[in-house]
Image (cartoon, coloured by chain):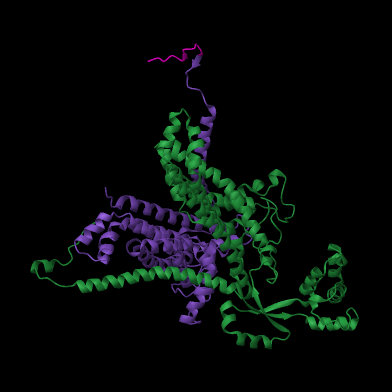
Amino acid sequence: MQLESTARTPAGVQLDLRKRRRPHEVLLQVFLFTCGALSILTTIGIIVVLIRESALLLNAPEFSLTEFLTTTEWQPHNGKFGVLPLLNATLITSLIAMLVALPLGVGVAIYLSEYASPRARSILKPVLEVLAGIPTVVYGYFALTFMTPLLRSIFGQDIVRFYNMASAGLVMGILILPLVASMSEDALSAVPRSLREGAYALGATKLEVAVRVVVPAALSGIAAAFIVAISRAVGETMIVALASGAGPAFTFNPFESAETITGHIVRISGGDLSYDSIDYNSIFILGLMLFLVTLVLNIISRVVVQRFREVYE
Amino acid sequence: MSARPSKPARERNDVFVDNLAGRHRAASIWQSLFLVSTLIGIATLTILLINIINSAFGYVALQNENDPQALLAAAKEAGWLSQDFNGDLAEAPQEALIEILKDNISAGLFRRFESEKPLAERSQEEIYALVQERVVAPQIVETWSLIESLTQRAEIEARVAEIPNGALEFRSWLTPGFISRPQNSDPQIAGVRTAILGSLWTIAITVLFAFPVGVAAAVYLEEYARDNFINRVIQTNINNLAGVPSIIYGMLGLAIFVRALEPISSGTAFGVGGAEETTLNGRTILSAGLTLGLLVLPVIIISAQEAIRAVPRSLRQASFGLGATKWQTVWSHVLPNALPGVLTGTILAVSRAIGETAPLVVVGASTFITFDPSGPFSKFTTLPAQVYQWSFRAQGEYRNLAAAAILVLLVLLLTLNFTAILLRNRYSRRLA
């Protein structure tokens, strides 16, 4: 149907009924899209930068990938590229952190969502938020000035080094605790009331309701919290940079000092770094590893939530 | 979920087992365990704060290079001071102090002070400060924490008595002077002014960049984007970026802003900046601000999206019904209503950026900067980077300095968070 593009009012004034062209609206939309697309550029930027700089190292004659993944000495300027000591330290500190954060975090979450009165919750949740808002460098200071002396006085000065992985890992666990607690608590709170009421009606105690009904129902959310927490621990920098030691070492003893991947990157790049040196390129290959590991962990956590979520109604 | 039949054997035998007491016992044990884990969290926060305050105050043992009483005696002997003067060095007349200064420092240094500002024109307090710094020159021999100072007073006094020329002083490391003085290699007069200014400059650039871009991206995703492939990629990508470790952003900033865009980030492309620097490179406030901007962008976008989503549909429909265009609706109705939520999210993102250390160290927060940053093309240091530097040598007075700097940082963050909470409360009251 063809519409008249003009019309007359009863008074005889001619009106233009065509849709007015508004070029600035289109321009604005383009601008808004560009801002949204900037995030993609950021990702591309990260990937390109990391791959391009590490490619320089990968193509270097003295570098071999098998050596990178299997040998245990990391001294790029001496041509020794074994990533295992750095990787090992990252895994040990993250493991210690998870051993602290997971049980405590889930305990806090269950307490907050199942036991705490609304009043107690209104006090405790902000406290956890404060704990989550403290800069990581402050936790690093805490590890160095409180946790390390504490460990040394418990286990002895000869056994525990001044810089050690245990202290960094424990404090990192405290750092991650609020993250695990709040993500798990969200998942627990999302379980519908009717499920709890049903279990109570069958004679379950409060603990049985919490552990056998609510936790299994929220398991996907709790699992996602665990995975995000691991990725956070692996990428955490300042605590390990301050407390875990400044030198790669291949050891499984948590009381020894050993540098993690992130700690190494920050120490090397913090000094006066000359571009295109072997040290400069080598931190990018570490960055690439770190990026891939955390990316995969984050994707897994999202898939876990989407695939295994129990949906009610 | 699966309701696991607990003991099938029992059902078969059809025997009633009274295990209720045991179940209740287990329940109360676990309940206390859950409570304990919560208390551990709170206890840690308390210990952390106590630990910092503990280091920020306490006794210090000072050793003077020159004893003030000996200086006064020498001044009397030389006739700069009348024999019947018996006050402290601080009360000595200006002329006497100038003579003491002249007598005890090298002629070159004295001429330098004279040329900076003629000594005769300076006030008595200024001269006294110079004498204190250059002649008396108290050096810190040992420091004690607050708890040690309160509990082991007698032992500390005994130790100080052994130090020749030693004096005991109770010191708060967090003073107005600490905030207003620039960084210095001497821990006695080191301050955090350069670091605070560096943090503020960096954050200003972060906000100028990330706030408009973040809100624009959120508006696009919530109001304009259709559910197609590209937009889903953008959304997923933003969620993934929020989980990338901050140090990776630092490396991105190092490669892009510091190196690739060096002419822009160092200011040479605009013919400005770099006047006070010896080595001109891209490790500037601009690079740091943009790096942090990219870091907080996903957080700002996600929180702004939530705020925009919370604006009721009816508002948009009413606006469209009156003939407003899409942009008019967004600009005049959606954004004003979403603004408090957007601001809260931005403030929280900014407080995260202020505490961020690793990316800035990678981008080049030089930790020893004694001059104030003068603009986006200055070299810089920030408060957390300063804390990192001081913590690294966690002995003696540096440990105290780090604690004092942490207190400054925490107060800054608390102020920001408090503002965010106020905004949130005001917003929810208006809707109610």
Name the side, left or right, on which B210 lies relative to B90.
left
In this view of the protein, can residue A249 be seen by the observer?
A: no
Name the side, left or right, on which B278 lies relative to B78.
left
A213 relative to B26, above or below? above
B66 relative to B178, above or below? below
Colour representing chain B: green
The answer to which of B138 and B227 lies nearer the viewer is: B138
* Quarter residue B88 falls in: bottom right
What residue is at 26 percent from the left and 58 percent from the top?
A196
In this view of the protein, can residue A1 be seen by the observer?
A: yes
Question: What range of the chain is rendered magenta?
Answer: A1-13
Task: Estimate the x, y position of residue A179 in percent, counting from the top left.
Answer: 42, 60
What residue is at 28 percent from the left and 52 percent from the top?
A310
Residue A186 on the magenta segment: no
Name the side, left or right, on which A4 lies relative to B382.
left
Task: Estimate the x, y position of residue B426 in percent, counting from the top left.
Answer: 49, 50
Name the side, left or right, on which A276 lies relative to B338.
right
A107 relative to B322, above or below? below
The answer to which of B90 and B70 lies nearer the viewer is: B90
Colour representing chain A: purple
Residue that extends furthest to the left in the rendered view of this protein: B13
Q: Main secondary structure of the magenta part?
A: loop
What residue is at 64 percent from the left and 86 percent from the top?
B157
Residue that extends furthest to the right in the rendered view of this protein: B79
